[in-house]
Image (spheres, helix red, strand yellow):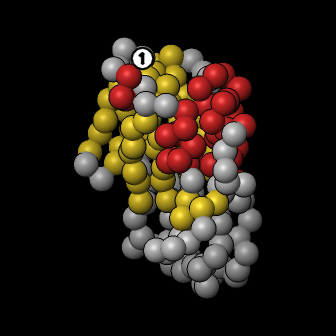
Amino acid sequence: MKVLRAGPDNQRLFREIITPFNVDDWVIEDRNGDRRFRGRLIGMGSSQREDHSHPIDTGATRQIINAQRCTACRWSEIYIFETSGMRDPERYIVYTLGPSVIPGENTRSNVRFASSGFEVVELATVRRGERGSPFLPAAHARALAMAAEVDDAITEAYVNRAVA
């Protein structure tokens, strides 16, 4: 069983133990608790960077200073799954996370279901504000590109998408 938690440690897990495209039993965590399913991870992406873009207090408290736009402190992750044995309305799962290593902040998480490749692209698209223009963050585009490599429905939607 493969487990993804709503926290900042998933990238380490992927480098060490998770192989995309294999069918596995999964547990993913969101604000409503654990969700269990059988499927394969077909796309993933992260905006996390290794190096901080601001000074860090290296004292005992490790206070993070001015981390507003630092992608080593806050970043986004996206995971696209194709489910096995589920009905068509739940063919895909798009799992997004907003991890943070800043003391007192929690990871934001969202689990959404899609029945088509076009819905997957829509769920990966981001809009800022009430009337913000849609855009596709680099990490989301990478996850979609990976998924398009192995899933024809996502290939069609990815190639014909209206956002860059």
- Percent x, y for residue 57? 62, 81
Q: Which residue is mark 1?
A: 84
Q: Secondary structure at mark 1?
A: loop
Mark yes or no: residue 58 visible: no
Q: Is residue 19 left or right of residue 25?
A: right
Above or below, 112 relative to 71 = above
Mark yes or no: residue 56 visible: yes
- Percent x, y for residue 74? 57, 66
Q: Nearest the camera: 67 or 39?
A: 39
- Name the residue at the bottom extreme: 66
Above or below, 73 relative to 7 = below
Q: Amino acid at mark 1?
A: Ser
- Percent x, y for residue 124? 55, 48
Q: Quadrant of the N terminus?
A: top left
- Percent x, y for residue 16? 62, 33
Above or below, 99 relative to 147 = below
Above or below, 77 relative to 34 = below
Residue at point 43% right, 36% down? Answer: 114
- Name the residue at the left extreme: 32
Q: Is residue 37 left or right of residue 50?
A: left
Residue at point 55% right, 38% down? Answer: 118
